[in-house]
Amino acid sequence: MVEKYHYIIYNSYMIYTIRKYGDPILRKKTEPVTEFDNDLKAVFADMLETMYASNGTGLAASQIGLSKHMLVLDASTEEQTIIFTLANAQVVEHSKEKTEFEEGCLSFPGITEKISRPSSIKVRANDQDGRELLIEASGFLAIVLQHEIDHLNGVVFIDRMTPIRKMLHSKELKELKNECKKSLK
Ligand code: CO
């Protein structure tokens, strides 16, 4: 019998603490990315690792306390790998038609709610090297992109809830805010 060794090489990724509802940074509009250097790539890699460590599908830089216009997402399906690391992403076109989808957010643990958003969009963004991209998205990818771009503009998913649906979560929201206040002290 040949003994098999399994080598696991750990890279030195940084897993960030995710900022929760009540943290003022989530309400701040982020700064555009202008330098496309190795430091930027390292932050994108850390963001992906942080997202995977929390079982998320998307993460915006403000959620790790960094006020930069950066987002990562993994909207892969069984057929297709869809991983994006985007800087300066903006929705430039959206359909009139809307879709409702049950959304959650890593900054709002335990809360999910149906949110209505345009079903298809066009997004302009830069990749890690600063190249310009035009992304045409529909379905799940369009939802995740809009959710993350909202974050970078200081908008969170409860802002997109109908007033009645938001009211249904008022107790949980209050609790989250109180926890956050304690942790920021
Ligand atoms: Co979110």
Image: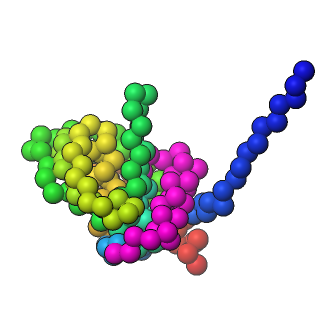
Who's the residue at 76% across and 42% down the image? 7
Closer to the camera in the image, 91 or 125: 125
Left or right for 27, reference 54: left
Name, please, the residue furthest toward the top. Answer: 1
Closer to the camera in the image, 93 or 183: 93
Instruction: Let me know if residue 41 appears in the view.
Output: yes
**The N terminus lies in quadrant:** top right
Who's the residue at 34% across and 75% down the image? 34
Q: For residue 171, what is the image quadrant?
A: bottom left
Q: Does the magenta-highlighted stretch encompass residue 18?
A: no
Left or right for 185, reference 126: right
Instruction: Let me know if residue 176 appears in the view.
Output: no
Highlighted magenta segment, given as a residue range: 34-58
Name, please, the residue furthest toward the left. Answer: 96
Q: Does the magenta-highlighted stretch encompass residue 39?
A: yes
In this rendering, is residue 113 above or below 19?
above
Colouring style:
rainbow
Closer to the camera in the image, 27 or 51: 51
**The C terminus lies in quadrant:** bottom right
Who's the residue at 54% across and 48% down the image? 52
